[in-house]
Image: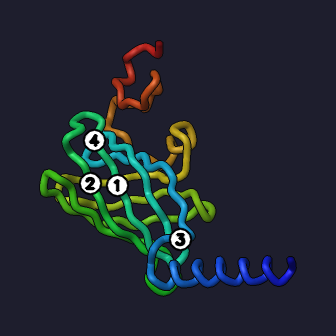
Amino acid sequence: MRKMLATGFAALLGVAVWAIAAGEGFLSTTGPVIAILAGDLFLGEAEGRLGGSGTLRIRSRADPGVTCSGQFTYSAERGDAGTMRCSDGATGAFQFHRLSLLRGYGTGSSSRGSISFTYGLSADESGPYLKLPAGKALRRDGDLMLVDVAQPVP
């Protein structure tokens, strides 16, 4: 029985190492992203892989037809930075700062305007890190929305 368990574990470990070496994302994590891109709210997710790279996908709340996707790296050698391209043709570059292994914030610029974002943080936790447009605030009424500050909270 022990030999069978050891053989099974060795096979599983071999598959895991092969998947990591092949870049299959066997050991990865996905978390929420809240972004302000040129004054518009975008929501989505980022997936970080064990090897120090990842992908980003976000969608505009104001115009759901506008999506952005990108790649990033996080390592001492390559820095914590990335690039993205949006379905409307906009492109951008960003840098980020890790608060922990799975949480952080960042800023950047795009051909549409400035970018600020958080990953792995709730809407409440994201507040100090996001550069909201003047007179706007984040509110949750079922979904997260960017609303006028004067608008009463339901």
**Which quadrant of the figure contains the N terminus?**
bottom right
- Residue at the disc numbered 4: 60
- Sequence-wise, the earlier of marks 4 and 2 is 4
Three-letter amino acid code at disc 3?
A: Phe
- The numbered dot on residue 68 is 2
- Disc 4 residue type (three-letter): Ser
What residue is shown at x 30% (from left), y 68% (from top)? 83
Element type where label 3 sits in the image: loop
Q: Quadrant of residue 61?
A: top left
Name of the residue lying farthest toward the right: 2
Asked whether disc 4 touches disc 3, contact meaning CB atoms under 8 Å apart, the reply is: no
Asked whether disc 1 touches disc 2, contact meaning CB atoms under 8 Å apart, the reply is yes
In the drawing, what numbered circle is on residue 47?
Answer: none
| Crowdedness near tag 4: few (<14), some (14–19) or many (≥20) residues, C-alpha within 10 Å | some
Which residue is label 1 attached to? 57
Q: Earlier in the sequence, mark 1 or mark 2?
A: 1
- Quote the CA–CA distance across marks 4 and 2: 8 Å
| Sequence-wise first label, 3 or 2 | 3
Horizontal side of 132 relative to 29 (left or right) equals: left
